[in-house]
Image (tube, rainbow, N blue to C red):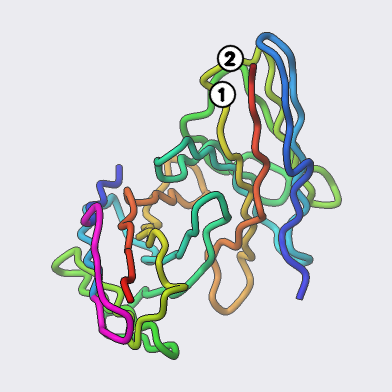
Amino acid sequence: GQNIDQPTEMTATEGAIVQINCTYQTSGFNGLFWYQQHAGEAPTFLSYNVLDGLEEKGRFSSFLSRSKGYSYLLLKELQMKDSASYLCAVSGDSDNYGQNFVFGPGTRLSVLP
Amino acid sequence: AAGVIQSPRHLIKEKRETATLKCYPIPRHDTVYWYQQGPGQDPQFLISFYEKMQSDKGSIPDRFSAQQFSDYHSELNMSSLELGDSALYFCASSSSTALAKNIQYFGAGTRLSVL
């Protein structure tokens, strides 16, 4: 099965940079995903890593180290609207032919003025 | 671009009633997933379908069932509703043939309240 760990809460200041870490243990690995979720809304896809290294996408970057079972999401030039929960999700082996997709507990980020 | 459509957006039921939630995936997506999210919790995977067949099963109660139809839309049927079933139910879809496959795109969710 999958075990995913993230910090519960983080606080940062508008305009700053914040790094949200995610560690995981999985049976197999088919990719790691980051989602943003505002309260009461659907998770929104941010980034996807399947190979080691950094994926950059505007103000958001995500890094993966498969050997360490570690990923981080980097948010630059923080804006108030970035206040949300950030969910790390891992796709691993399934007992069936589907993917076993598990979300971490999420990190609630508060951006302060 | 078309997104995942879920209906209804809100649903109020009483204990022991039944409910049916519908999900229309993004066009040309062949895989549908259902999640349940309680207040302050992360989404819990319930069940998924690939090409109209169940592909994976998570923590779906026996009182719930789901299927995917020939037009790829999916329905989650919930019977003998309990107070604890009150939650946000998300549907997501993905494409097994897309370049970045396995990325799941979520619908806006159905908020179910059981009274």
Q: Residue at x 63, y 71 (%)?
A: B97
Q: Residue at x 74, y 48 (%)?
A: B6
Q: Position of residue B70 (x, y in %)?
A: 85, 47
Which amino acid, by three-letter code, is at mark 1? Asp
Region in magenta: A7-18
Magenta run includes residue A13: yes
Quarter of the image with the C terminus of chain B is top right
Protein chain holding label 1? B
Q: Position of residue B59 (x, y in %)?
A: 47, 30
Q: Nearer the viewer, residue A35 or A64?
A: A35
* Lateral position of residue B8 relative to residue A86, left or right: right
Q: Residue at x 39, y 51 (%)?
A: A103
Q: Residues within 10 Å of mark 2 (few under 14, many from 20)?
A: some
- Considering the numbered disc 1 on the image, is that residue within a helix, a strand or a loop? helix
| Rendered image: mark on residue B85 | 1
Q: Position of residue A10 (x, y in %)?
A: 24, 62
Q: Position of residue B10 (x, y in %)?
A: 73, 38
Query: Residue most toward the left?
Result: A68
Q: Nearer the viewer, residue A112 or A40?
A: A112
Q: Are marks 1 and 2 on the same chain?
A: yes
| Rendered image: mark on residue B82 | 2
- Considering the numbered disc 2 on the image, is that residue within a helix, a strand or a loop? loop
Q: Nearer the viewer, residue B46 or A52?
A: B46
Q: Residues within 10 Å of mark 1 (few under 14, many from 20)?
A: some
